Image: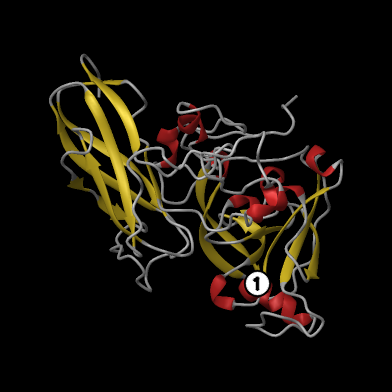
Amino acid sequence: MREQPFNAEPPRSALVSSYVTPVDFFYKRNHGPIPVVDDIERKLPKYVVTVTLQCAGNRRTAMSNVKKVRGVGWDVSAIGNAVWGGAKLADVLELVGISKMTSTTKSGGKHVEFVSIDKCKEENGGPYKASIPLSQATNPEADVLLAYEMNGEPLNRDHGYPLRVVVPGVIGARSVKWLDSINIIAEECQGFFMQKDYKMFPPSVNWDNINWSTRRPQMDFPVQCAICSLEDMTAIKPGKVKVCGYAASGGGRGIERVDVSVDGGKTWVEASKQQKTGVPYIADDMSSDKWAWVLYEVTVDVPHSTEIVAKAVDSAANVQPKNRRVWNLRGILNSSWHRVPSRVGHSNM
């Protein structure tokens, strides 16, 4: 029997085996037991959008090395990139009289709330729920989906069968699985995971002085990259080493550059980036998947034991910070340089 709630991430090396993450290697984040639900009818045009989803707590373990935080101890693999198929939320809302590009309804609705069949202890046994602004939900270019397919196949139970929300460019907690209902509300969802979790606080805030109402729910995730071809303290032969990984940024921002260093950040080498095979990747170009990660690689010379470092820059010139100064008590949004200590010695690499 699986532990409940079931949370799992793949080995980091599995993430860079393909641009589209196989369903079996896509991280699983749940807040309660996985429900059993029936199938649905599909009556609206299907859209297919490639979207990277990332748990807000991705790389939390490294943040805990600075100071202990609460939450699932994710390494670097609480992230995945999939091809989602479903109806656009903007089309669904139009069916009930809410026009596209609407930010406020006549009755004062400004947010769209998604309620799951998933029950969780944080809601005192009630359903998991989250919301996004109505302006985002009714914007066709935001590509918010009510998805029933993942990588060309029907959703499986772990990923929200039969229907889930996919909200591109924001933390995974807003992409509600096992969707039960949609509500138009005046204020943000008042659920636990909107109001008392997944918020960013400064390092001065602890569990004794926290005031949840002083911060808005986290939506976009920051620019992020990780090295996936090397585990911590990997033994490698001296000489040329190929470094591979992923890079992504929230809000539809592309990746302008990924830099890799073998001397702790004193000097850098730019890595090559790719999404689809045979198609050149250019940040924010129409031919690129704007909601998806890029995979990068570069070959570097490693003559002795060292710390290999990677950092990404997105199309808005946001760059990952050098240190883990983004520490916060919930351990979310760790976007500091990814560092992999490597030991030069005998190896089959």
Vertical placement of 227 versus 173: above or below?
above
Please tell me which residue lies in front, 108 or 28.
108
Which residue is pictured at 72% across the width and 63% down the height?
A: 188
Position of the C terminus by quadrant: top left
Residue 302's place in the image compared with 223, above or below, is: above
Is 117 left, or right, of 147 in this rendering? right
Q: Where the N terminus falls, by quadrant?
A: top right
Say whether residue 138 is left or right of residue 250: right
Answer few, some or many: residues within 10 Å of disc 1's Cα (few below 14, many 20 plus, some between 14 and 19). Answer: many
Q: Does residue 206 sit above or below 48 in this rendering?
A: above
Residue 269 percent coordinates (x, y): 17, 45
Spot occupied by residue 50 in the image (x, y as percentages of width and height)? 50, 61
Q: In the image, residue 24 lies at what x, y percent?
A: 57, 39
Q: What kind of residue is marked 1?
A: Ala
Q: Quadrant of residue 114?
A: bottom right
Residue 15 visible at all: yes
Based on the displayed image, in which of its 4 quarters is residue 148 positioned? Answer: bottom right
| Residue that extends furthest to the top in the rendered view of this protein | 346
Q: Is residue 96 above or below residue 119?
A: below
Q: Which residue is drawn at 45% across and 42% down?
A: 326
Q: Nearer the viewer, residue 331 or 253?
A: 331
Q: How many numbered markers are drawn?
A: 1
Q: Is mark 1 on a helix, strand or loop?
A: helix
The residue at which mark 1 appears reads as: 137
Taking the spot 56% from the left edge, 54% from the top edge, the residue there is: 151
Q: Residue at x 73, y 77 (%)?
A: 93
Q: Position of residue 77 (x, y in %)?
A: 49, 38
Residue 154 visible in the snapshot:
no
